[in-house]
Image (cartoon, grey):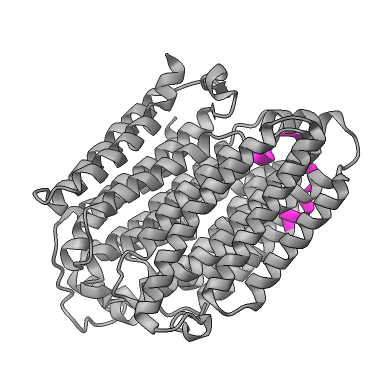
Amino acid sequence: MHDFISLLPLIIIGSGAILLMLFSAFEKIQLETASYISMGFFAAAFLAQLLVGCGPETVLFDKIFNGMLVSSNFTMIAGLIILGCGFFTAMNSHTYFKINLFCTLEFYAIMLFGACGMLLLTLSQELITAFISLEIMSLSIYILVGYDRSNVTSTEAILKYLMLGAFAGAFFTMGTALIYGGTQSTKFAEIGSFVAGHSGTNPLVLGGVFFIFVAFLFKAAAFPFHAWVIDVYDGAAAPVTGFMATALKTAVFTIFANFLAINGALHKDWITFLFYIAVFTMFGGNLIAIGQNSIKRMLAASGIVHSGYLLIALVAISTDNFTGTVVGYYLAAYAVGTLGIFSALSYLAGEGEKRATFDDFRGLANVRPYSAAAITVFLLSMAGIPPTAGFMAKFYVITSAFTAGHMTLAVLGIVSSILSMWYYLRLIIHMYFHEAEECFETGGSPLAAAATFILVFCVFAIGLYPIVI
Amino acid sequence: MIQDYLILSVILFCLGILGVITRRNVFTVFMSIELMLNAANLAFLAFSRLHESMDGHVLVMMVMAVAAAEAALALAVVILLHKHKGKLDTNVFSLLRG
């Protein structure tokens, strides 16, 4: 029974996706109805996910799935983040697609399919299951990125993303093949016991793990494979970008952490590699972000920087009693901040996202003080100012790096955090210390604005949660 | 014997990478990616024979199904591109520069 409840969110989202796909064949159903239906499914799955409170690890349906799916508190947190992101993205899309008219009913169905792949990815403890769920997730996200078919920029974004994503997928398969050759299995548990049982490095396992890391680093937008992320985020519609930046990253980092945690020896072999990747990701991302003029591109680059912090957390995880709380907390804090800004952009950007650069948001605080205040809260959270969620998350990541004995990494993390103030504060200055040049009229429904203010509340709630408890 | 299959698989994989990096036609790039996936499939089969188990065969089926889904989407994107630009050369797409 417990196994069934653990799997219930996945079942709800999966059946919701199929139902909505069938509904979209009927002409009578309105776009708004579809967005309410998808919100309902996300909310139901979120509540179902809340019911799952379990020990460190439970194998789901051991006989039927042959130990491929494992749920734990970590996957539960990741599931909650993904489903929450889906819910707020549905709200944002409701508003966004009242102003921009290229949406059809299938949009929401594909979003549910994407969430389904992400949930499966967090649960999977087997490489081929991970590959399949990674592809379910990626294929849905590709379609969402290129949804505006009349727009050349979005077509170019989907082409870039699809080519590079499929390239990374091929690396993942080759890595799986090599690991299968080395260890006779693709299950995490058996790979772990193989690595533990054999001293010295097996060349096949070494190469395979490297290839799999390449695929994960690509999906997480880490240093050598980060170039695509800015273009793709820029080309996609604002709600889709918000969904990609938060839910997709959550899913990828969950499986990455689960994969690293399979064995201490494996984690130890790759610490130096991950150390340099984390450092280059943080500083490379900062350099790119400083040079951007468009808000979406700046947020994409800041997403790269946040991947760097998450990599610090991955370097510092302890494999013996892995809980993933630091990674989970950082993902939650990052998700509310980023999703909040994209909610605000969904209703403020206007028709065809005409307000895109820093200059377009000049004097927002004079005309729409509440929206400007909300955006400021999100930016301060991402920069890591107390008492927001972002501060606590960075605090935990850096303390975990200290505890694990990576002083250099912790110090570099703090330096990078100070550097990132530059571009977050720049937007705040543009909003508050300039005269307004336009009246920032917004159309559509109030749902995205509602999502923004709920997320402001979430930023403080998540930030104060560890202190109160 | 097993080495021969693995060497062939590695050669195919490297050819795929080379194709993705050097070729400018969208179709050729997608074909190169399929080549990489099939190189991985060949490695799966060779290892399956080595370990004398059927697991590898099952995994190959899974990978092929996923590759087919990906190809379907890729072809749709190619048609979309052709509508916009009338060309399939990746050089003409320069609106977005990271």
Q: Position of residue A384 (x, y in %)?
A: 49, 56
**Outermost right residue:** A200
Chief secondary structure of the magenta portion: helix
Name the side, left or right, on which A240 lies relative to B26: left
Q: In which image quadrant can residue A435 be found?
A: bottom left
**Magenta stretch contains residue A268:** yes
Which residue is found at the position 38% from the left and 29% from the top? Answer: A49
Q: Residue furthest left?
A: A28
Q: Which of the image's four quarters has the N terminus of chain A? A: top left
Tell which of A79 and A321 is nearer to you: A79
Q: Is residue A221 visible?
A: no
Tell whether position B55 is magenta. no
Q: Place residue A264 in its image quadrant.
A: top right
Query: Residue A400, how many percent across, how many down?
Result: 65, 43
Asked if A456 appears above or below A436 in the picture, the reply is above
Place residue A268 in its image quadrant: top right
- Tell me residue A361's x, y (percent): 29, 76
Residue at figure coordinates x 68%, y 62% from the top left:
A279
Q: Give residue B31's position: percent from left, percent from top.
A: 58, 66
Q: Which residues are magenta?
A: A258-275
Could one spot residue A353 in this view of the protein?
Answer: yes
- The residue that appears at 39% across and 78% down in the rendered structure is B82
Q: Quadrant of the C terminus of chain A?
A: top left
What residue sits 48% from the left and 80% below the top?
B88
What is the number of callouts on the image? 0
Q: Is A162 located above or below residue B27 in the figure?
A: above
Classify A175 as above or below A263.
Answer: below
User: Which residue, as the protein is rendered here, is positioned at the far top?
Assistant: A1
